[in-house]
Amino acid sequence: MRIPFVDLKAQYLGIKTEMDCAIQAVINDSAFIGGKNLKSFEMNFADFIGARHCIGVGNGTDALFITLKALGIGAGDEVITAANSFIATSEAITATGARVVFVDCDERTYNIDVAGIERAVTKKTRAILPVHLYGQPADMDGIMEIACRHGLHVIEDSAQAHGAGYKGRKAGKFGTAACYSFFPGKNLGAYGDGGAIVTDDDSLATSARMYANHGRIEKYNHEFEGVNSRLDGLQAAILDVKLKHLDRWTERRRAIALRYDAGLGGIVITPFAPEHVRHVYHLYVIRVRDRAFLAKILSEKGISTGVHYPIPLPFLNAYKYLGHTPGDFPVAHLLKDEILSLPIYGDMTDEQADYVIETVREALNNA
């Protein structure tokens, strides 16, 4: 049996008629930039999150960058974020001219350590940018308490957390704004790049929309210099179709995760999710001592795996100038050699999940 890490073809085949009709309608209307498809998706995704505004942009990295710029964050400012994330999170901060300040992660949830945030706050801090890593919301109560006490913005990096929940509320509803990626492999993925900003702040929504569209609302009436970052009509139509199926796919991911938990508990360290959190399992990440050995066996048996992420951000060459050492981020440094992502997606069958479980158990028992 061969099991891909994610099966986008199976997903497409499950909604083929609906998707083909939506794509053809965009082509028939030549509605490639802006238009009704974008407005429809922005309205529907805002409703899905429970926010007042959704601004479609070119990708998740742009969503973070534009939000920071729209909040006036730049040179001389500091923004706190997690040490274990994809570089887009930190890249967006430094692109504004601000200084990125990394904080270690919690060993159980892998999300940013709240106590570390408190220690990292300085007079230059303007914002906290928590990452809802792997689909599990960060400790938003603790983060918001620190932010309120110090007068800081909170920008939720929700690139992996479409539909995730925290104490009965959707992730993305706690901070000043939340930023999403619609990269094809995401829980809600386009057929190319795409991203969005959601917020309840009317002023921020206007500023972000203008910044993403060359600093304008009306054609040729540019209030300031911005960038060109737009979610195109074709991707918006695709996302609008997929959004209708997202809850169903999410529940399937959660069912597969429970199956993994039951079959792998005691063999490897399985993901920990507090009861008050709705984990959407963008990634199902286990911890295992001999990761290279297990990944090799799984590959030989036709099972694709991944490592998210093999190098914590502070240790990348891109941030060598910050002078960090492993002792600064002991948990992230520990996890980097043990984490392994197993296949999980909305169209995965019980048979496929059981094959993964059996293969992992056999490999580690034999070892």
Image (tube, grey):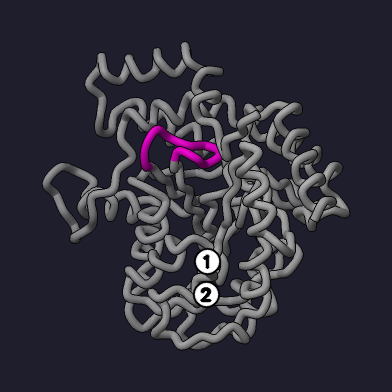
Find residue 34 and report its horizontal and vertical position in percent.
28, 33
Q: Amino acid at mark 2?
A: Ile
Tell me the SS state at disc 2.
Answer: strand
Residue 104's tag is none
- Please indicate whether residue 243 sits to the left or right of residue 350 in the image: left
Find residue 367 and report its horizontal and vertical position in percent.
80, 56
State if disc 1 and disc 2 touch (CB < 8 Å).
yes
Vertical order, 161 against 338 (above or below): above
Most common SS among magenta residues: loop
Q: Quadrant of residue 204?
A: bottom left
Dot 2 or dot 1, earlier in sequence: 2
Vertical order, 227 against 190 (above or below): below
Q: Quadrant of residue 162?
A: top right
Marks 2/1: CA–CA distance: 6 Å
Q: Residue at x 54, y 58 (%)?
A: 156
Q: Residue at x 40, y 13 (%)?
A: 21
Residue 80's tag is 2
Report if residue 336 lies within the magenta region: no
Provide the residue designation for mark 1. 129
Q: Is residue 273 visible?
A: no
Find residue 256 and report its horizontal and vertical position in percent.
74, 36
- Please indicate whether residue 314 sits to the left or right of residue 288 in the image: left
Q: Residue at x 41, y 45 (%)?
A: 195
Tell me the SS state at disc 1.
Answer: strand
Q: Amino acid at mark 1?
A: Leu
Q: Residues within 10 Å of mark 1 (few under 14, many from 20)?
A: many
Q: Quadrant of the N terminus?
A: top right
Q: Is residue 69 visible?
A: yes
The span shown in magenta is 184-193
Q: Residue at x 33, y 39 (%)?
A: 231
Residue sitting nearer the eye, 291 or 158: 291
